[in-house]
Image (cartoon, helix red, strand yellow):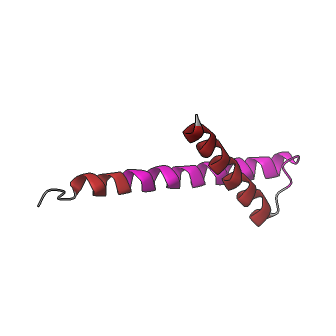
Amino acid sequence: MKIILFILVFLIIGALFIITNQNLAINDPENFSQFSEMYQNWFDKIFNNTQTITGEVIGLEWLP
């Protein structure tokens, strides 16, 4: 349960950073569209970076 809560808080904080750094008013449909595109790009980068890190960790020589 704590992991799910941590993930949700992380995603919400990421959304708030995007909104504040871009000075977006979410109640405007154009800004909401721009926000959703930026959020999706940010989430895609996180997913791709996680895949890259996992692939590198799996490829390491763990035994001496």
**Could you tell me residue 8's position as x and y percent?**
64, 42
The C terminus appears in which quarter of the rendering? bottom left
In the rendered structure, the answer to whether residue 8 lies left or right of residue 33 reads left
| 36 on left or right of 24 | left
Residue nearer the viewer, 31 or 43: 43
User: Which quadrant does the N terminus fall into?
Assistant: top right
Q: Is residue 9 left or right of residue 61?
A: right
Q: Residue at x 25, y 51 (%)?
A: 58
Instruction: Based on the picture, tell me whether residue 56 belongs to the magenta stretch.
Output: no
Q: Nearer the viewer, residue 4 or 13?
A: 4
| In this rendering, position of residue 34 left or right of residue 55 | right
When the figure is inspected, residue 22 is found, relative to residue 28, above or below; the finding is below
For the residue pair 55 and 63, the one nearer the viewer reads as 63
Where does the image place residue 24, in percent across and percent down from the top left?
Answer: 82, 58
Give the residue drawn at x 59%, y 44%.
Answer: 7
Residue lying farthest to the top in this orientation: 1
Which region shows up in magenta? 25-52
**Predominant secondary structure in magenta?**
helix
The quarter of the displayed image where residue 4 is located: top right
Residue visible at 61% across and 45% down? Answer: 6
Residue shown at 43% from the left, 52% from the top:
50
Residue 37: where, in percent of width, then height?
66, 50
Residue occupying the far bottom of the picture: 21
Q: Is-magenta flag for residue 37? A: yes
- Total marks shown come to 0
